[in-house]
């Protein structure tokens, strides 16, 4: 097993697995994942050790829809269980594809998915004003029934209909950190913290309890990166670099940002909530945690260049 | 971490998670799993090291029903992906409950679920005559449409309607054996090979490919037990002991069977296919693999006695 080389946590967006406009068939998702895994296998072939985390937005959305559509026949499962299902589903597809992509380089490393719970606190301010829309769209009438009968918080979503909203609290730690660390240290390519991990709170007696929330996968990936002692955090998305003045005539893509610059840009509102903002925040936190750590936000297609500092936006200490 | 003591693979039936007659709500399944975990935690408290595997029949059945009911809105997923989802779902619930049950003894061992693929061969005779019914019941007309349009093999099921049948091939090995072994050796309580594992075949180039089949969880648990170097294989079910002449006036429950006796009883048709037969076969294979290994088939409620040889049916070399 390969245990030298820098350890990098790669966070891959759910849209890299099910692309916008696709129906989300198994065939489409497998093809997308195989494409992503070719980039990951190239990184491994360069000598990097990888831990992979991934989004699950489209997949957990489909599972919620399936639960909703068949609730008269099969009891609908709560959000934490749907998230666990999506981890099994996506992790399984990555296990197979990553192995196949590594085989193209003659590499044969063990790969494993660990079902991951992420610790959050109900003191998080997001619990008092949930903001993350999930699942299907409803009419106002349906939404108000769900609010009354199930206690869902519902909000009107930009003229497209009503949706359930849940809190998106800050991740505090990875419950399976010891197990994941053991595997990483043994040279296993680990897939963990899928969809940001299943959000759980720790009761006073130390037991964990799943809650109805979602966790940003980049912020959870950053916790994971700290927990496994990674050297780098690579956030792969569908734009090549972080930009300031995004969408305006003076838009400018950045090759690198110092922590001070990133903080200034974030405070000035350059990064969109739920999109680039948590990615930049995750990168900043990781670089802040230890001076020799690096972070890069890049397009999936240029992962090989980005890991060497030749693509994407690098966040550096100063 | 606790790394002394005998290593035991415990195989738990899917009916211990969703009991016959229950609707299968999350609350019901959590309560059942917590009940099972109290027994498992007692074994750990006695000093045994555990690896847990479990069935997924009712859960994957529900997932298939959900896929079927919402297929006009969400593309239905193939059986391998549904199986992966059930591993995430059930593994997650066990992770939480096992941790809570251990806490009642003041134990705090790490617990992790590994999404598991199980190797099978398409040369297996079950591929030429699939026998395992899965998913919802159909009318004859619906069944024949599915057979024509999707290539499903369908059979009439004991007057209850038509069902899809899939092969149930013999498990040949656990793809994630290295990772699971690493965790077990590090003292992690591992949940693996859920539902018998996701059935995959190994292509000539070494890549794995999911197939539409199901694997008996006890036979897969036996492969797992060999792969992790277990001392014991404990198959927990809803009857207290293995019986010969089952259901007849001269029915006799057995405290122990030698391999020779077990072979004779099996050949004489005492054990029902898909029920006690694979459990006895799994126990026999494990005991045959090394003379100092033991196997027991017992009721979940008497797990604590069975591990010490005071309940259940033990299979011994001779």
Image (cartoon, coloured by chain):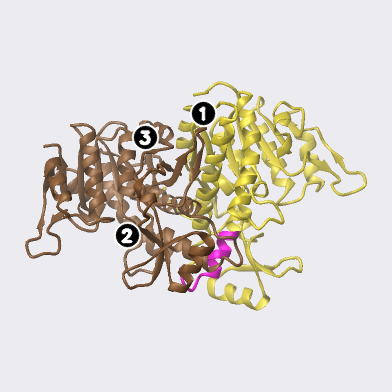
Chain colours: A yellow, B brown
Circle 1: is it few (<14), some (14-19), or many (20+) Cα within 10 Å? some
User: Which residue reaches farthest top?
Assistant: A4
**Magenta span covers which residues?**
A62-74
Secondary structure under tag 3 reads: helix
Q: Which residue is mark 2?
A: B15
Subunit of mark 2? B
Which residue is painted at 50% across and 43% down in the image?
A: B209
Subunit of mark 1? A
Quadrant location of the N terminus of chain B in the rendered image: top left
Choose mark 3 or mark 2, whichever is in front.
2
- Measured in 3D between alpha carbons, the distance from the residue under mark 1 to the one under mark 3, in whole angstroms, is 22 Å
Q: Which residue is mark 3?
A: B184
Residue A20 screen position, x and y as percent: 71, 54
Secondary structure under tag 2 reads: helix
Mark identifier at residue A108: 1
Q: Of marks 3 and 2, which one's residue comes earlier in the chain?
A: 2
- Image: B11 above or below B8: below
Choose mark 2 or mark 1, whichever is in front.
1
A39 horizontally vs A82: left or right: right
Q: Quadrant of residue B153?
A: bottom left
Residue B184 screen position, x and y as percent: 36, 34
- Image: A192 above or below A134: above
Mark identifier at residue B48: none
Q: How many marks?
A: 3
């Amino acid at each position: 097993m390969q245990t030298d080389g820098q350890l990098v946590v790669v966070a891959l967006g759910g849209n890299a697995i099910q692309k916008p406009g696709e129906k989300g068939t198994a065939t489409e998702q497998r093809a997308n994942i195989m494409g992503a895994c070719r980039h990951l296998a190239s990184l491994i072939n360069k000598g990097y050790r990888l831990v992979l985390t991934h989004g699950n937005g489209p997949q957990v959305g489909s599972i919620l829809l399936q639960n909703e559509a068949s609730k008269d026949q099969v009891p609908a499962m709560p959000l934490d269980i749907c998230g666990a299902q999506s981890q099994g589903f996506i992790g399984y597809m990555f296990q197979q594809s990553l192995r196949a992509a590594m085989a193209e380089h003659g590499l044969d490393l063990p790969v494993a998915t660990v079902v991951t719970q992420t610790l959050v606190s109900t003191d998080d301010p997001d619990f008092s004003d949930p903001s993350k829309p999930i699942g299907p769209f409803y009419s106002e009438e349906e939404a108000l029934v769900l609010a009354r009968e199930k206690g869902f918080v519902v909000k009107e979503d930009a003229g497209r209909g009503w949706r359930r909203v849940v809190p998106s609290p800050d991740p505090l730690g990875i419950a399976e950190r010891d197990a994941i660390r053991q595997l990483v240290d043994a040279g296993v390519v680990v897939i963990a913290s899928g969809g940001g991990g299943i959000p759980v709170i720790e009761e006073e007696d130390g037991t964990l309890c799943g809650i109805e929330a979602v966790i940003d996968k980049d912020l959870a990936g950053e916790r994971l990166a700290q927990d496994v002692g990674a050297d780098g955090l690579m956030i792969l998305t569908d734009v090549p670099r972080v930009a300031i003045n995004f969408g305006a005539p003076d838009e400018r893509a950045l090759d690198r940002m110092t922590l001070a610059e990133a903080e200034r840009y974030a405070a000035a509102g350059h990064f969109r909530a739920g999109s680039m903002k948590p990615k930049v925040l995750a990168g900043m936190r990781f670089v802040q945690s230890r001076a020799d750590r690096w972070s890069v936000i890049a397009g999936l297609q240029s992962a090989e260049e980005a890991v060497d500092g030749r693509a994407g936006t690098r966040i550096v200490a100063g």
